[in-house]
Amino acid sequence: KYDKALTAGRLKALRKRRGLSQSQVAAALRIDRSTYAYYERAGRPARGKLVFLALYYRVSSDFLLGLSEREAGSQRRLT
């Protein structure tokens, strides 16, 4: 089952673990910082951004959604 709070927590933890600011992640995704902050607060990234977030953090979208405990994702880089 999809858990928004878990998604929000994972996004925040991944960002902090990498020593990034919300502004840095937002810039990479080409969104406003307030939009990214909403993702971390509400755990509801737009569908299209979920794929980019998974690529950016190199985790699976299932992990971000709380459907898997396994972080492993694509080794591709988001450019």
Image (spheres, rainbow, N blue to C red):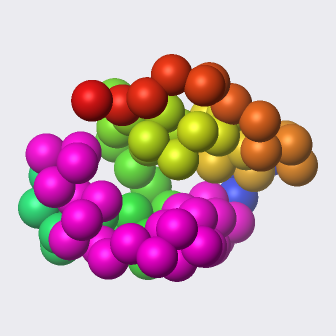
Residue 15 among those drawn in magenta: yes
| Residue 7 located left or right of residue 16 | right
| Residue 16 located left or right of residue 79 | right
Q: Position of residue 35 (x, y in %)?
A: 21, 63
Q: Is residue 29 above or below residue 7?
A: above
Q: Answer with the quarter of the image where residue 14 lies.
A: bottom right
- Evaluate whether residue 67 shows in this view: no
For the C terminus, the image quarter is top left
Q: Is residue 56 above or below residue 36?
A: above
The residue drawn where x is 16% and y is 55% is 27
Q: Answer with the quarter of the image where residue 21 lies.
A: bottom left
Q: Range of the magenta residues?
A: 5-30
- Evaluate whether residue 68 shows in this view: yes
Residue 24 among those drawn in magenta: yes
Q: Position of residue 39 (x, y in %)?
A: 39, 63
Residue most extreme to the right: 69
